[in-house]
Image (cartoon, helix red, strand yellow):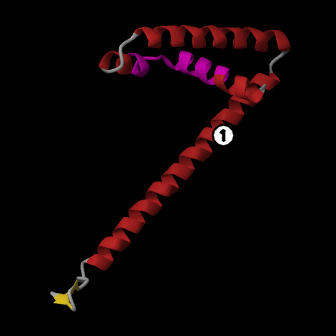
Amino acid sequence: EAVGGISAVTNDAVPLAQSMKEHDDDRQRRQLAMARQTAALQQGLLNDLNAMDEIEREKLLADAKDAHLSFLRHVSELPIGEERLHFLQSIDSDTQRLLAIYKLWEAHSS
C-alpha cells in the first residue's frame, strides 16, 4: 500500500535485511578465518626456510624457481579457458608448495 506516494515497508523487509546482514557477517567471518589460515601457512613456510641450513635452503629455492619458470612457460602456452583451468587444477601439491615458497621468498627478500 502506498502512503503519500511512497510504498509502505512490509513486515517482510526487516527479517530480510537481518538475514542479509547475517549472511554478510558469516561471509566476513569465513574470509577472516581463511586470511588467518593463509597467514599461518605463509609464516610456517618462511619459518621452515629460515630453519634450514643455507645449502639446503638454496637448493629448495632453486627448485622453487625452476617450478615457477616451468609453470609460467606452461600456462602461457595454453589458451585462456577450459584447458588452462584444467592445468591449474591438476597441479600437484608438491609443485603448489614450491610455487608458494618461491612467491613468498621473493616477497620476503625484496
Tally of marks: 1
Which residue appears at 61% of the width and 46% of the height?
36
Tell me: residue 60, above or below residue 85. above
| Residue that protrudes farthest toward the bottom in the picture | 4
Q: Position of residue 50 (x, y in %)?
A: 80, 25
Q: Position of residue 45 (x, y in %)?
A: 69, 28
Q: Position of residue 51 (x, y in %)?
A: 81, 24
Which residue appears at 33% of the width and 15% of the height?
83
| Residue that protrudes farthest toward the left in the picture | 1
Tell me: residue 15, above or below residue 58. below
Q: Is residue 40 left or right of residue 78?
A: right
| Residue occupied by mark 1 | 40
**Which quadrant of the view contains residue 14?**
bottom left
Which residue appears at 65% of the width and 13% of the height?
64
Q: Quadrant of the C terminus?
A: top right
Q: Please tell me whether residue 93 belongs to the stretch shown in magenta.
A: yes
Tell me: residue 16, above or below residue 76. below
Kind of residue sitting beneath label 1: Ala
**Which residue occupies the foreground of this view, 33 or 68?**
68
Look at the numbered disc 1 and give the secondary structure of its residue: helix
**Which quadrant of the view contains residue 88?**
top left
Q: Please tell me whether residue 59 belongs to the stretch shown in magenta.
A: no
Magenta residue span: 87-102
Q: Is residue 39 left or right of residue 49?
A: left
In terms of secondary structure, what is the magenta stretch mainly? Answer: helix
For label 1, the crowd category at 10 Å Cα-Cα, with few meaning under 14, some 14 to 19 and many 20 or more, is: few
**Which residue occupies the foreground of this view, 2 or 93?**
2
